[in-house]
Amino acid sequence: MTDLPLQIVAGTYNHVLYGWDVDLRNPEKSSSTVQYVYESHAGCITALAAVGNVLVSGSSDELIKVYDLKQQREVGTLMKHEATISCMHFFQRTHLLTASENGQIAVWRCRDWECLKTMQGHKGAVNSMSIHPSGKLALTVGRDKTIRTWNLLKGRQLFVLKKPKECSVVRWSPDGQTFIVSHESTVEVYTAETGVVKSELNMPSRVLCALFVKADVLALGLEDGTLHFVNVLLATEQLSHKAHDNRVKDMCYFDENEHNILVTGCTDGTINLWRLSFSDHSEVKGLQCVGRLQTLSRLTCLCLARTHPPPLLDTSTETADGSKAKRKEQASTTEEADEPTQPTARKRNRKSKGKDKDKPQAGKTAQQQQQQ
């Protein structure tokens, strides 16, 4: 048993989800603890997100699947989008934001998986999305060469900023005071209060993914397979490293209880686990590869999940207080809510053609299960 149970989940181009348990004390042993290989969608898996025991996956089949990681089974399907799911993010344990390639954004309440609001603004695909730490705002960038700010309390668009080039990644800083936007090999750092670019960083290759590992330290994954760590306030690079032979497709990060683990995924199916070390001034001073996993498939997305907190999918909380639940149905989209329940049968069965999905079994694909 691990001191901080984690699961690495990878989505692939050939419709398959991979899951590994990770022992942070011995990350190099993670490759021997594959938990499941599950053919989950009819199309390419394009986005993943997790909170607690709940995992969601989005696909080019326009569906969002919901899973209980503790029980290792699929529990339902969310259907609202009419295009490929492009990105998904949880806000705490209460709400899920999803976006698709037709520009639609949906806000879901996790307690009962009700779609509270849909918003439309982008004239084309939403490439990336980021939720403000307060949960009141969200930023999106799209194929229509715009950056859009959304008021999540009222469910409407606030501002539109046109750019000369298509932007691929947007991220809020942990304190919500700044945000970054990347286009091709350039990263722009904005002041949230004014919306003005205060610094600019130029990378040697196209930026494919980004996340903050400290309040002012940004990790960047590039098309040439390198990792770069930069200080967004000083506009300086702290460290760079050749992480993969091919493009760094996605990244995720865990930094609790002195564990600073960065997980990077490459399009060739390789997943590397890196232990970061920091100076007294929060600068990245070291990067050590402590584990490697292999999907044997074309990797498209990654996420980390905490697999042993109190279960999210506990139906006993659904009707614990009827009057309380009624009040919360009238609350704003980012207000605290009850724990999530399983999606309803109506949402699960649409487009299923009358066939129920088999429960995923550890280490088995759908094809292997059918042979049994």
Image (spheres, grey):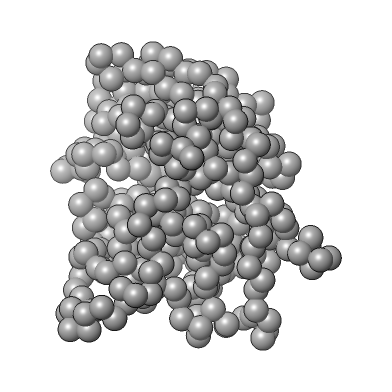
Q: Nearer the viewer, residue 221 or 338?
A: 338
Estimate the x, y position of residue 31 in percent, counting from the top left: 64, 35
Q: Nearer the viewer, residue 120 or 289?
A: 289
| Residue 136 visible within the image | yes
Estimate the x, y position of residue 259 in percent, counting from the top left: 38, 29
The residue at the point 76 percent across, 64 percent down is: 369
The residue at the point 57 percent across, 20 percent down is: 242
| Residue 118 visible within the image | no
The residue at the point 35 percent across, 57 percent down is: 310
Estimate the x, y position of residue 154 in percent, counting from the top left: 21, 69
Estimate the x, y position of residue 266 in percent, counting from the top left: 62, 36
Relative to 18, is 111 on the left or the right?
Answer: left
In the rendered view, tell whether residue 96 sits above or below residue 347: above
Q: How many marks?
A: 0
**Residue 202 in which image quadrant:** top left
Q: Quadrant of the C terminus?
A: bottom right
The residue at the point 33 percent across, 34 percent down is: 256
Relative to 61, is 182 on the left or the right?
Answer: left
In the rendered view, tell whether residue 141 sits above or below residue 222: below
**Residue 233 in which image quadrant:** top left
* Furthest-front residue in this view: 1
